[in-house]
Image (tube, rainbow, N blue to C red):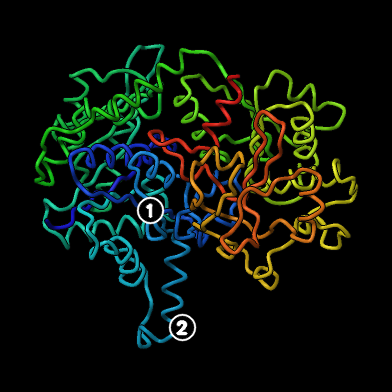
């Protein structure tokens, strides 16, 4: 079959759930037997999200091929269970960089380089990059809000895609807002009308409207929206706020979104196989009614939940797998001291120390790890969290009081964490860390082996610093188990200690591969240990 292209835009305000809509549609079409790939265009000029603060952008999601991407790719992977690539996350910074590099090489033969056609052509190249793959449908989410000046070239490019392909091969979905006015007990359609008008002014007529709403849309309002926005009534889709994130595909299925898409694209709208997903949602919702396990995330970016989005989702996946409700408490590591750590962690069944960069808040992380190690509280360290566990062990068990990381003190006399050899001469920030999927060999007879039930795993990484092998012998003699390493044995990937309910830390990011229907084992076992 010919490739089909679906574009998801947003209007009125940000945060309406374009990413969840795109991810949900991917799942629904996949359940109909189609091979789907999700893609995201972001209008900002940063080349990639890797250099952006988590407070600006939320977490940086990492793909198998080492791309630092928008967090929506995490939603795409979790909903569709497809591993995505660098081509699935494109910023305007990346587009401008590529075009300028081509101009510098002389690829344009001295012609004036302009937004049209050079920038728009480069955008379309990314959209068409799946042309030679076995993908049936490309779902492309456009970041930002229609009308934003920085996104106009993307809107123009997707308009051109509609002209370059048969009408039944291209579909435009517009996600918009229906605000509810409680005083008058009514939904207001005017913001949606204006948003559609704005999109139409750029030459794009939306085929389907996905309306974010807190209440059901009355039939007469659907008719009004359809009339004023020039779409079929059946193409006005309600997207109500869901109690469970993974329920959204089921809700959109009931609203007829996938059927409308199939009708427009002339796809066989055979009976969808949603049973497994419905069972999954039922399992998650039932777990929410059961006993509670409270997990503390001790980090430095806790003012924004999205900074740890994949960690939070992984904990919820593990909760459903263990048939318990997971309550998460975000704890600012900057506020933790030796004097107040017991109070800060009081009542928690377990803690996670996630990834991050920089010196801010690291002493609080170290104190939290010391406390849970000494008091037998289940603990999972991730990336920076593993490195802080190594420093804590060195300081408090080996009595190396000045143990540190070269990231925080380049002149440290005892750098138990040091910069990776191939990172020493790196000066550029973006996309230069150890990124992507790498193998890990797991040692027999360890907690890691019990957790993974395999001798070799592949996990995603994002770091510049590593365990310093000069301290291996000292640490192993004192009880630190190096249970996972790179195949050549040089890079320590997993550490653990004995005689503890659950104490394990990984240099990689297990949260990036957790799925609601396939929870990541480190999180599953963490929650299981918290139930005991």
Q: Residue furthest front?
A: 445
For the residue pair 130 and 64, the one nearer the viewer reads as 64
| Residue 151: percent from left, percent from top | 40, 54
**SS of the residue under disc 2:** helix
| Residue 101: percent from left, percent from top | 46, 78
| Residue 261: percent from left, percent from top | 17, 40
**SS of the residue under disc 1:** loop
Of the image marks 1 and 2, the number of the one nearer the N terminus: 1
393 to 411, vertically: above or below: above
State which quadrant residue 28 falls in.
top left
For the residue pair 125 and 117, the one nearer the viewer reads as 125
Q: Which mark is residue 84?
A: 1
Residue behind mark 2: 104
| Residue 117: percent from left, percent from top | 30, 71
Q: Are marks 1 and 2 in contact (CB under 8 Å)?
A: no
Q: How far apart, in angstroms, are the residues tagged by discs 1 and 2?
A: 30 Å
In the image, taking residue 485 as reference, residue 280 lies left or right, namely left
């Amino acid at each position: 079959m010919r490739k089909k292209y679906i574009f998801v835009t947003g209007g009125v305000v940000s945060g309406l759930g374009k990413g969840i809509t795109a991810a949900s549609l991917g799942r629904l079409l996949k359940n109909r037997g189609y091979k789907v790939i999700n893609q995201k265009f972001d209008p900002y000029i940063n080349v990639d999200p890797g250099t952006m603060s988590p407070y600006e952008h939320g977490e940086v999601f990492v793909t198998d091929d080492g791309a630092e991407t928008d967090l929506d790719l995490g939603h795409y992977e979790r909903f569709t269970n497809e591993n995505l690539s660098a081509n699935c996350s494109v910023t305007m910074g990346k587009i401008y960089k590529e075009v300028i590099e081509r101009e510098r090489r002389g690829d344009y033969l001295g012609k004036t380089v302009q937004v049209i056609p050079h920038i728009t052509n480069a955008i379309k190249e990314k959209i068409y990059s799946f042309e030679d793959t076995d993908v049936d449908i490309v779902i492309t989410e456009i970041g930002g809000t229609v009308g934003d000046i920085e996104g106009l070239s993307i809107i123009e490019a997707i308009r051109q895609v509609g002209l370059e392909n048969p009408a039944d091969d291209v579909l435009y979905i517009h996600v918009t807002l229906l605000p509810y006015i409680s005083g008058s007990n009514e939904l207001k359609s005017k913001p949606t009308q204006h948003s559609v008008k704005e999109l139409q002014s750029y030459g794009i007529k939306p085929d389907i409207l996905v309306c974010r709403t807190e209440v059901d849309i009355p039939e007469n309002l659907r008719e009004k929206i359809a009339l004023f926005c020039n779409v079929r009534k059946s193409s006005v889709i309600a997207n109500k706020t869901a109690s469970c994130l993974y329920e959204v595909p089921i809700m959109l299925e009931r609203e007829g979104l996938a059927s409308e898409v199939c009708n427009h694209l002339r796809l066989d709208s055979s009976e969808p196989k949603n049973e497994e997903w419905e069972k999954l949602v039922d399992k998650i919702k039932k777990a929410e009614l059961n006993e509670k396990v409270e997990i503390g995330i001790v980090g430095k970016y806790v003012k924004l939940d999205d900074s740890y989005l994949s960690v939070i989702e992984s904990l919820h996946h593990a909760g459903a797998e263990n048939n318990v409700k997971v309550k998460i408490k975000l704890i600012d590591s900057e506020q933790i001291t030796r004097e107040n750590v017991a109070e800060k962690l009081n009542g928690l069944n377990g803690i996670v120390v996630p990834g991050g960069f920089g010196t801010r808040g690291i002493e609080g992380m170290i104190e939290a790890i010391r406390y849970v190690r000494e008091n037998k509280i289940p603990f999972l360290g991730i990336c920076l969290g593993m490195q802080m566990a190594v420093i804590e062990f060195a300081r408090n068990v080996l009595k190396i009081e000045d143990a540190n990381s070269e990231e925080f003190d380049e002149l440290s006399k005892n750098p138990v964490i040091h910069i990776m050899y191939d990172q020493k001469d790196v000066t550029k920030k973006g996309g230069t860390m150890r990124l992507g999927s790498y193998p890990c060999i797991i040692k027999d007879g360890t907690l890691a082996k019990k957790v993974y039930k395999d001798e070799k795993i592949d996990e995603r990484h994002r770091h510049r610093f590593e365990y310093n092998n000069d301290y291996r012998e000292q640490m192993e003699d004192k009880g630190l188990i190096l249970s996972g390493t790179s195949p050549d044995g040089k890079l320590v990937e997993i550490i653990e200690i004995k005689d503890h309910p659950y104490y394990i830390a990984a240099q990689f990011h297990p949260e990036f591969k957790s799925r609601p229907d396939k929870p990541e084992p480190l999180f599953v076992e963490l929650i299981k240990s918290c139930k005991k």
